[in-house]
Amino acid sequence: MAYSTSDAIRKAHPSGCVIMTEDKLASLRKLLLMMLTDIDSTAKKNGIEYQLGGGSVLGAVRHKGFIPWDDDIDINITRKECFRLMEAMEKDYPDKYSYLIPGVTPGYMLLFPQIRLNGTSVRTRDDFNNSKCGVCIDLFIIENTYNSPVRRFFHGIGCQYYGFKVSAAKFRRDREFLVPFAESTGDVRLLKTIRRRIFFATLFARGNPDRITYKADRWNGRCSDDDSVFVTVPAGRRHFWGEKRKRSVFFPPSYREFEGKTYACPNNIDQYLTTLYGDYGRIPEDSEKESHIFIEPFSLG
């Protein structure tokens, strides 16, 4: 299996990181659930469709709530509904949240939007250069892709190319933080990989990082066919090809319990989770469990 830098970072333990006690985790989850309640309220009031995504779906199926060691909530949403949701949230909660948008928010170099809770500080390795780093919910965009195999192929190639370029630009921008970060984990392989990626990033990803992110986001959303047979989540953990599914896997939604409330989830949950996690019913070993690395300053308000 290929060595994944992002997976290695998720499982790393750098010195100086925030120790997530049970009390801190419980407080973080309480805020996340409050945010999800706000999102759900605004979505229902405005007829906006969204679904739980990723590990949140897995948690709903396997635990009827958070995965026991999980510390975030993921949402899947179409591009049109995503921007409707953020506009409606701004009206409902004008001072409560900030909205980070790829290619629009300066310095934000992830290819999925985030809703972040103002007055908190929850900084991850993606936030070395982000001034707004509060408790957040990720909005993974379900993108249309083409029915034509040829056009779909080139859409996928472009998504992979731009995704790599954004990642490289981010490594280049954050290089002064990433090397000490990797050194502190004690993972020699991770350190070598990061140094190698920074070297290639300095060659490949020159130019304005925000402009690179903007182009990548525009390419991801280039297909305007809202009735296409296939959709994909190019910003997801398995990227364009690994996230490509028939639209019917997502829609119409099914519904599952999550922490005592019912939320929309993908239509074919088994196929969705199998694609992402394989044998998703198996409880992973401790060494396989993923969680975020939080860096000071850490404050839940």
Image (cartoon, rainbow, N blue to C red):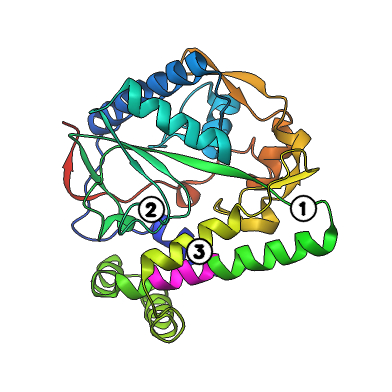
Whole-percent x, y for residue 240 in the image: 65, 57
Instruction: From this view, report whether residue 3 is shown above or below residue 113.
Output: below
First in residue order: circle 1 vs circle 3: 1
Residue depicted at x 44% and y 16%: 41
The magenta stretch spans which residues?
Answer: 163-170
Label of residue 146 in the image: 1
Q: Are marks 2 and 3 in contact (CB under 8 Å)?
A: no
CA separation in Å, label 2 and label 3: 11 Å
Instruction: From this view, report whether residue 227 is shown above or below residue 172.
Output: above
- Location of mark 2 (residue): 104
CA separation in Å, label 2 and label 1: 26 Å
Residue depicted at x 47% and y 12%: 260
Whole-percent x, y for residue 177 in the image: 24, 69
Dot 2 falls on a residue whose secondary structure is loop
- How many numbered marks have been drawn onto this rendered protein structure? 3
Q: Nearer the viewer, residue 54 or 63?
A: 54
Q: Is residue 149 left or right of residue 75?
A: right
| Residue 165 inside the magenta-drawn segment | yes
Instruction: From this view, report whether residue 290 is shown above or below residue 226.
Output: below
**Callout 3 amino acid:** Lys
CA separation in Å, label 1 and label 3: 19 Å
Q: Residues within 10 Å of mark 3 (few under 14, many from 20)?
A: some
- Most frequent secondary structure within the magenta stretch: helix
Residue depicted at x 38% and y 53%: 104
Q: Nearer the viewer, residue 117 or 289?
A: 117
Dot 1 falls on a residue whose secondary structure is loop
Label of residue 215 in the image: 3
Where is residue 222, by image quadrant?
A: bottom right
Whole-percent x, y for residue 178 in the image: 29, 70
